[in-house]
Amino acid sequence: MSIAWLPLISLHILAAVLWIGGMLFLSLILAPLLRQTHDPSSFRLLFSAAARRFRSMVRLAIVILLGTGPLLLEIRGLSIMDPSTWPSVLLVKLTLVGLLLLFTLLHDLVLGPRVLRIGSQPVATRTAQDLFLLSVSRVVPRLALLIALAVLVAAAILARSI
């Protein structure tokens, strides 16, 4: 591979770092720190603002990753149109990426808006379905983070194998 492709590779890696690093920051630093506050409404407001800002960065990262990924495959001599020639680790990585995108969409478009609505209701009026959605909304981002870390491992293996 030519050094001329280094900016493309760097952009791809930077986008992945932005996405995974942001997930780690939100789940390991911001959420626990904000849960220690005694004002739940402040917690919700700050976390929601941070999550909205992060969501726009994630969308940019996704566009960059989906744009640079196929180009990087072509550079390495792997046709995006012929998956039969792909190494198995690439199939694993792309499957994990698909799952990560699915979890991200589920979180951002389905769970997020519902959780905001539930969070604005008095606790006493919440239904069993509301409580279930709240518990699922805590699990989905954690699963997405685990999948993202697995994508990172698959990417490292892939980089060493081709």
Image (cartoon, rainbow, N blue to C red):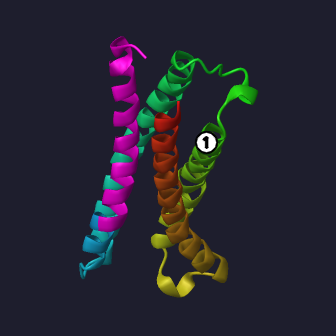
Q: Is residue 6 above or below residue 157?
A: above
Q: Write down the region rendered in magenta.
A: 1-28
Residue drawn 35% across the image and 58% down it:
24
Q: Position of residue 17 (x, y in %)?
A: 35, 43
Q: Nearer the viewer, residue 13 or 44?
A: 13
Q: Residue furthest front?
A: 161
Image side of residue 162 versus residue 42, left or right:
right
Number of numbered tags placed on the structure image: 1
Q: Is residue 117 above or below residue 4?
A: below
Give the residue type at disc 1: Val
Furthest residue to the bottom?
124
Q: What residue is drawn where x is 56% and y is 49%? A: 100
Q: Is residue 150 above or below residue 59?
A: below
Query: Going by the image, does 138 lie left or right of 15?
Result: right
The chief SS type of the magenta part is helix
Quadrant of the drawing holding the N terminus? top left
Task: Name the one closer to the observer, 115 or 30.
Answer: 30
Residue 162 in sight here? yes
Given the current orientation, which residue lies at the most extreme right position? 84
Q: Position of residue 152 (x, y in %)?
A: 46, 47
Q: Residue at x 38, y 35 (%)?
A: 13
Which residue is denoted by mark 1 in the rendering? Answer: 89
Above or below for 58 versus 34 = above
Per the image, label 1 sits on a secondary structure element best described as helix
In this orientation, which residue lies closer to the viewer: 23 or 35?
Answer: 23
- Residue 129 is one of the magenta-drawn residues: no
